[in-house]
Image (tube, grey):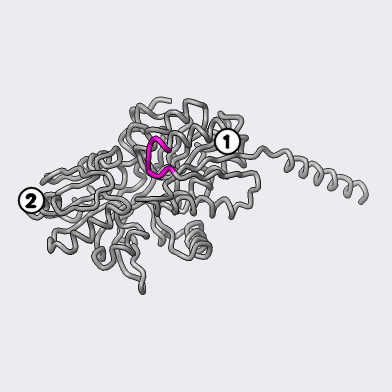
Amino acid sequence: MKKLGAFLAGLSALALIGTAQAEPVKIGMITTLSGGGAGLGIDVRDGFMLAVKNSGNSDIEVVVEDDQRKPDIAVQLADKMIQSEKVDILTGIIWSNLAMAVVPATTAQGKFYLSPNAGPSALAGKGCHKNYFNVAWQNDNLHEAAGAYANDAGFEKSFIVAPNYPAGKDALTGYKRFFKGTIANEIYTQLGQKDYAAEIAQIRASGADSVFFFLPGGMGISFMKQYAGSGVDIPLVGPAFSFDQGILQAVGEAALGVKNTSQWNKDIDNAANKAFVAGFQAEYGRLPSLYASQGYDTANLIISAMGKASVSDADAFRSALEAADFDSVRGDFKFGPNHHPVQDIYVREVIKEGDVFTNKIIAKGLSNHSDAYAVDCSM
């Protein structure tokens, strides 16, 4: 018994030494916390921090900064975090134009970047990098599913609208890649635009039988309210970004019944998602959004990799990230060869539960779907 006690004591001591010497991971989160689109960044941050809290891992330090949706500010913050804060990993960016300004410089300095949102095509194909991972989607994906749904719904002539920036261009490219009908008109609006009277007038006169639009954040709120008040009754189709949890409360009744596409929803039936939805509501007093789910999965991916390898061993840590050995709120999750997800994408319908506007899954839009740019990626 004495020998057994001594043996166990020795194991405990070794465990304590291992814990004391565990290498901490410092994560820099640059996201949008003020101005237009702040709700998106807040949700990514809150989902990420909930996962960190739930893990109980004291070896994780997160430094959070507000990019103000400005590329120059994002670049300055990234330089500061890498050079002064000595972060190991960067994450958090919502907008693709900011990602294009930050990600290549980050990976060139040997740091990992894990995107919880922006997935520009330029970083999925020839511009891919072994230290860049996207945990959300490639920009085209949800729009491709919307094009597939439009076919199933019998639409033959779509009017399509998006902001004039990388994600907007990817959005309309994705929709057109899968939509088999004709395009009545293709309009690019200003990023952050609030008045859509001219675009709605063009829709009214177009002869279209459907409207596909990608207008995230406050842009979508403005468009939906103005569209509802215009009297135009052409059916709308969009990605989740225009019908997400925070947006729906601001849009209200005008969104009811609209179909939209997403890789996540609160009613996906798996244990990880149920725990996430309940935990998020308990922690923050609101339903989680698509963005919150992406932040949550991003943190859990990092935590899973930390359990397998040290971030200072870049090759081993990269392999641990590639394994994606974590319980995603989406269910099955894996990376393609360009470090972008291969996943199911659903069709949702906007409904009302009590006083809350939300979404329910009504169909699967695309199964085990990857992106069109992976073939151009060579790592």
Q: Position of residue 318 (x, y in %)?
A: 53, 33
Q: Residue furthest right?
A: 2
Magenta stretch: give its range: 67-73
CA separation in Å, label 1 and label 2: 53 Å
Question: Which amino acid, by three-letter code, is at mark 1?
Answer: Glu
Q: Position of residue 245 (x, y in %)?
A: 37, 60
- Quadrant of the drawing holding the C terminus: top left
Q: Position of residue 118 (x, y in %)?
A: 38, 42
Q: Name the residue that disc number 2 marks.
A: 206
Q: Name the residue that disc number 1 marks.
A: 85
Residue 53 marker: none
Question: Which amino acid, by three-letter code, is at mark 2?
Answer: Ser
Q: Residues within 10 Å of mark 2 (few under 14, many from 20)?
A: some
Residue found 44% across the figure and 41% down from its top: 115
Q: Please, what secondary structure does the residue beneath circle 1 have?
A: loop
Q: Position of residue 222 (x, y in %)?
A: 25, 57
Specify which label sits upstream in the sequence, 1 or 2.
1
